[in-house]
Amino acid sequence: MPDKEKKKLDLNRREMPKQLPEVRRQNFNEDALGYPEETAIQEALRCLQCRNPKCVAMCPVEIDIPGFIKCIAENDFFGGIRVLKNKNLLPAVCGRVCPQEEQCEKGCILSKKGAPVAIGRLERFLADWEAAQGEPEVPPIPKPTGKKVAVVGGGPAGLTVAGDLIKLGHQITIFEALHEMGGVLIYGIPEFRLPKAIVKREVEYLKKLGVEIITDFVVGKTRTVDSLLQEYDAIFVGSGAGLPWFMEVPGENLNGVYSANEYLTRMNLMKGFLFPQYDTPIKNHQHVAVIGGGNVAMDCARTALRLGAEEVHIIYRRSRQEMPARLEEIENAEEEGVIFDYLTLPVRYIGDENGWVQEIECLKMELGEPDASGRRRPVPIEGSNYIIPMDAVVCAIGNSPNPLIPETTPGLEVGKWGNIKVDEETGKTSKDRVWAGGDVVSGAATVILAMGAGRIAARSIHEYLVG
Ligand code: FAD
C-alpha cells in the first residue's frame, strides 16, 4: 500500500464506466457497468482507514466499511465479501441503489475535499466479483433453537430479518403476496438500474441459509396475522408501502393515466416490454408525462424512453434544487433526454372521445416560504394555465402502506397515514409478539433504511425468543 501521505493526496475518485446515453436509452440492460478489478483496487487504496470511521456511523446497517475496503486494497476479495456480508445480505443491491451520497460517503473524510471514496461502487464490485466465482460461501448456521418466526413480505426489510434470524438458529418462513420475492427491488426498480437476476441471486442465498419462502400468500386474506400467531412464536411485518397516491384532479380515470406502481409492475414484474412473449402488454405511448420528482419518477421517465416514447416530460411543482431524487438519477435522466418541466402543476387531464388521455392542463408555480419539510412551498401563479399534448401520464407522487394487514389485525395500532406504529428502539408494535419495519412503518423511504429497521427488529425478536 502506498504511504499515508500519498493516499491523503489522492482526490481522484475513479469513474465507473456506463453505457452512453444515446445507446442506453434504447435498451433495458444495466446502464452502469461496474469497476474493473484494477480500478476497484485503485479506488480502495484511496481509503484513509480512519480510526473513528464516520462512514460506518452513517450506515444504517453498520457495515465495517474500512474493513471491506482494506481487503479490496490488499487484493483479498474473499476476505472483503465476508466482512461485507457479515452485516449486509444484499450488497449487490445496496451497491447499486443506496443513496450513498447522503449516508456513508457523506461521512467519508475525503468528502470534505469533494471526492469521497466510492464506497457504493466498491460494495457493488465485491458482490459482483463473488457472483462471478459461482456458488456463494454459506456461513455456519448454529443448532436450531426450535423457535419459529413468520416474516410478512419479501422486500428488503423482510429479507434482512429472515437473514439475521436464521443465522441465529431460528426457523424462518417468509410469506410474500406476489409470485416473486424482492418487493420493490423486483417489481419497482427497473432492470436497467437493478437487474432482476441480482435480486434473485440474493434471495437464493437466503434459501441456501435455510429460509422457507412461500409466495402467492396474502397475509390478511390467505391467513390473518392472528392465525399465524397460533403457529409462530413471533411475526415481523414488512409489507411495504404499495398503495399509490393520486392527485385527485379531474380526468385521472382516463385510459393512459397510470400510477407509477402499475406502470413499473407491468414492465418489471410482468415483463411488458417483452409482450407478446409475456402476457401483460404495455401500450406504446409516444408523449409521456411523469408527475413527481423522486427516484420513482426518474425510473418511470427513463422506462418510458426505453419503451420508445418520442418525448418524455417530468412535471414537478418545485425546482431542480428541491427534487428528492438522487442527483445521479436526475443526471441520468437529463443525459438521456428527459425534459424537465419545473414549477409546473397538472390541474386536469383531458381525454379524447374514446376515453384516452390526450392533453394535460398545467399551472405555473413560483416558490414561496419554506413549508414543514423545509423546502420552499410552491405557490400557483394565477391565470398561468396552459395545455400540453400527452398520450400517457404516470403519477409518481408517493405511496402509503396498504391497509389490509392493519384492518385484519385487531390490536395493531396505526398512524395518520396508515403506517404501523412501532417502538423505534425495537420495532415492536402495539400487538404482542408482532414486530414491524421498513416502508410499512416509515412510509416510502429507502432500501437501506428498510434493512436497518429489519436489523433492529431482528435483534429484538431474538432477545424475546431466547428469553
Ligand atoms: P417493499 O420493498 O415494498 O416490500 C414489501 C413486500 O411485502 C412486497 O413484496 C409486497 O408484495 C409484500 N406484501 C405486501 N402486503 C403483503 C401481504 N398482505 N402479505 C404478504 N406480502 C405482502 N430506495 C433506494 O434506496 N434507492 C433507490 O434508488 C430506490 N428507488 C426506488 C424506485 C422505485 C420505483 C420505488 C417504488 C422505490 C424505490 N426505492 C429506492 C425505495 C425502496 O425500494 C423501498 O424503500 C424499499 O423497498 C422498502 O422495503 P420494504 O421491505 O419495507 O418494502
Image: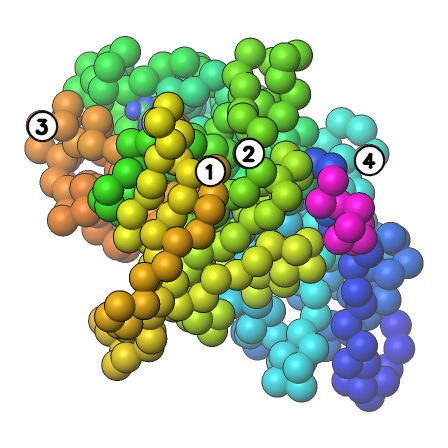
- Asked if labels 1 and 2 touch by Cβ distance under 8 angstroms, the answer is yes
**Label whose residue precedes the other's in the sequence (2 or 3):** 2
- What residue span does the magenta drawing correspond to? 18-26
Q: Nearer the viewer, mark 1 or mark 3?
A: 1
Horizontally, residue 221 falls left or right of residue 102, namely left
What type is the residue that disc 4 sits on? Ala
Instruction: Judge whether residue 136 can be spotted in this image.
Output: yes
Give how far across and how far down residue 294 sits, in percent: 45, 55
Q: How is the image coloured?
A: rainbow
Task: Kindly identify which residue carries mark 3.
Answer: 410
Q: Of all residues shown, which one is farthest toward the front? A: 353
Give how far across and how far down residue 33 sits, in percent: 79, 48
Q: CA–CA distance between discs 1 and 4?
A: 40 Å
Q: CA–CA distance between discs 4 and 2?
A: 38 Å
What type is the residue that disc 3 sits on? Pro
- Asked if labels 3 and 2 touch by Cβ distance under 8 angstroms, the answer is no
Q: Which residue is more in the foreground, 265 or 104?
A: 265
Quadrant in which the C terminus is drawn: top left
Task: Kindly identify which residue carries mark 1.
Answer: 392
Horizontally, residue 235 falls left or right of residue 447, namely left
Q: Residue at x 66, y 82 (%)?
A: 114
Residue 285 is tagged as 2
Q: Nearer the viewer, mark 4 or mark 2?
A: 2
**Label whose residue precedes the other's in the sequence (3 or 4):** 4
Residue 25 part of the magenta-drawn span: yes
Q: Which residue is more in the foreground, 33 or 5?
A: 33
**Label whose residue precedes the other's in the sequence (2 or 1):** 2
* Residue count near mark 2 (Cα–Cα under 10 Å), binned few <14, some 14–19, many ≥20: some
